[in-house]
Image (cartoon, rainbow, N blue to C red):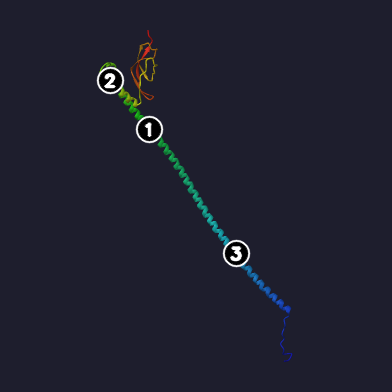
Amino acid sequence: MSDDDAVDVEVESPDDAARTNGTADATAEGTSGESADANGGARDEALAAAVAEHDEALAREVAALEAELDETRADLLEAEEEVEELTSKLARVKADFSNYKQRAKRKQDEIRERASEALVERITPVRNDLLRALDQEEGSDLRPGVESTLEKFDEVLADEGVDPIDPDPGEAVDPARHQVMLRVESDQPEGTVHEVYEPGYEMGDRVVSEAKVTVSADEE
């Protein structure tokens, strides 16, 4: 083979090979770095989106809880107002019932008292008749029976809370309990009871009938 026909082969020097390899590595490394940066940016965006979505969900949940709390507070306020109204109504009903019981008791007491007074008004004249009979029939066989009847009669009056008004001679005249029939000469102090013509009767602090009395006057 002639020298002209020989193929020229360019032999790459070691330095040139190193530079070539270095450039290739740098190019590969740059490409890898760009890919890593791109992947990192995508992850950051996905994380930010997830956080934003989570925050939005929490905001919706908080808003729902606040709305529920407001509704519960409104219901509680309404319930408290209803309880207060019912408590006030109960107090009024209790007061009305207490007043009714007091009025009913007073009414019953009045009815009972009037009935007792009516009874006393009917029976006291009978007692007075018995007293007069005892005065007229002294020494008679009727006296023991009349005395026994009078004793039982007085027991009935005592059971009804009735006390005779029967002042002693010389006792001061009480206009609220004594009815002066006339004034007589007497050895008793002037203006005091001389004699009881007819006993009166009282129930508690109420005078059913006044005692009829004569009153002592100055001796002339």
**Could you tell me which residue is drawn at 64 percent across and 70 percent down?**
34
Using the rendered view, name the quadrant where residue 3 is placed.
Answer: bottom right
Sequence-earlier tag: 3 or 2: 3
Using the rendered view, name the quadrant where residue 200 is placed.
Answer: top left
Residue where numbered disc 1 is placed: 105
Spot occupied by residue 87 in the image (x, y as percentages of width and height): 45, 41
**Could you tell me which residue is drawn at 49 percent across and 50 percent down?**
72
Residue where numbered disc 2 is placed: 144
Establish if 113 lies above or below 6: above
The N terminus lies in which quarter of the figure?
bottom right
Residue where numbered disc 3 is placed: 45
* Three-letter code, disc 3: Glu
Secondary structure found at label 2 = helix
Distance between mark 2 and mark 1 Cα atoms? 43 Å
Spot occupied by residue 109 in the image (x, y as percentages of width and height): 36, 30
**Could you tell me which residue is drawn at 27 percent across and 20 percent down?**
144
Circles 1 and 3, Cβ within 8 Å, touching? The answer is no
Q: Residue furthest left?
A: 141
Sequence-earlier tag: 2 or 1: 1
